[in-house]
Amino acid sequence: MIKQDVSTCERCQTSGKEILQEPLHPIKPECDPFHMISMDIKHIACSRGNHKYIIVGIDYFTKWVEAEAVVLANSIEVATILLEEIISRHGTPAIILTDNGSPFINDLIRAIRKQFGIKHHRSSPYHPQSNGLVERFNRTVAQGLRMLPSPEKMDWHLYLPAFLFSYRCIKQASTGHSPFRMLYGRYARTPFENYLDQNSTSFRYPDESFEEQVLDKFQLIITALRRVHLSASDAIRKAQVHQMKQAVRRLIATKDKPPFLIGDMVLLYRENIAQDLSAKLEDRFDGPYYVHMVYDNSTYILKTPNGTVLHRRVHGNKLKIYKQPRIFFNPLLFEKQDGSTFRAFDQPTPEPSGSIQFKHFRPKPEQDN
């Protein structure tokens, strides 16, 4: 009984941390470079050149990254990166995945997508895991730039291209190949190969003309790319299956909750709490809300108790079940025969000959505040 009362305490529920971990829904990329890309904006400490942001574009299949340090994070900068760094170099993507930020949701980007026939998918608000590929890169680039010596940290934008080259040449666990090899069908030539002159993909046939050598090299790259793409596609599939199994094991081991259903009362985690001292005393959850609609990708539409629908989708990882306080009887609240009520300690003890007789009183239900 006491445990139930504590678990249904509204103040405890809105201040707690416990949330439901939904199962993973991995994105299955096409076996086609730059068919689907993800874009995001990473905020970095201001550099000596007033650069505060990195606009990132990453291909879901090859994991190749294009990134540019910018002073302003607006639609013009995003459009410039999309046109000059991605479309002009790698072709037009079929799908772009972004968050719901204003630099990606505006008339300029909408016009470019319409002109090039690009579909736009949006990740769940305040849930970066739904755009996990670019979020992992954001963590990696931040960690890499933090490793710069203190005097060079103010010029981090000058070191970004070197970091990108290193990232593109490192083998990815999900594909088994580096982004460079996934895109070009060969390993990147480094100063070490120049020193040893032992690049495995370089060759010469003295008896062949230059045109014949070009055709041979082209055929070699095409064959290598085909093998790399097929093996990478299989590796990505296996990695996603493994990640889903791991997530399910963690879910089963740590949670014993049903999925949210239409009509369930839930609390919504407040992602936009101010990051200051006063925020430590604020509630972590808003609500309660009712689940209005359920989608297959673990996102939900909520509505308020008065019926107002919140049209913004929210991810299930930001929700938890709201437990309604139980209704109990207050033995000190009584009702007279005429319908009026009073508490026992507010009334003088009635005399036996008085007009008020306790035998006519009965307990009246009251909700606990």
Image: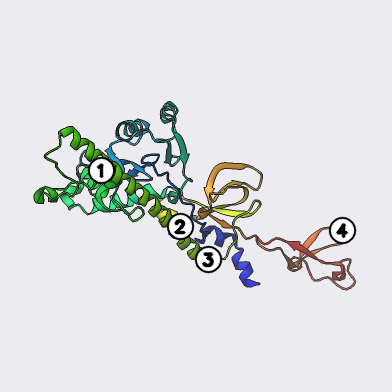
Mark 4 to mark 3 CA distance (whole Å): 57 Å
Mark toward the start of the polypeptide (1 vs 3): 1
- Of callouts 2 and 4, which one flags the residue occurring earlier in the amino acid sequence? 2
Seen at 37% across and 45% down, the residue is 61
Q: Residue 280 — which label?
A: none
Q: Measure the alpha-carbon separation of dots 4 and 1.
A: 98 Å
Q: CA distance from mark 3 to mark 2?
A: 16 Å
Helix, strand or loop at mark 1: helix
- Tag 4: amino acid: Asp
- Looking at the rendered structure, the kind of residue marked 2 is Val
Of pointers 2 and 1, the one earlier in the residue sequence = 1
**Mark 3 against mark 2, which lies toward the viewer?**
2
Left or right of 114 on screen, residue 148: left
Rendering coords of residue 3 (x, y %): 61, 71
Question: Secondary structure under badge 2?
Answer: helix
Which residue matches tag 1? 220
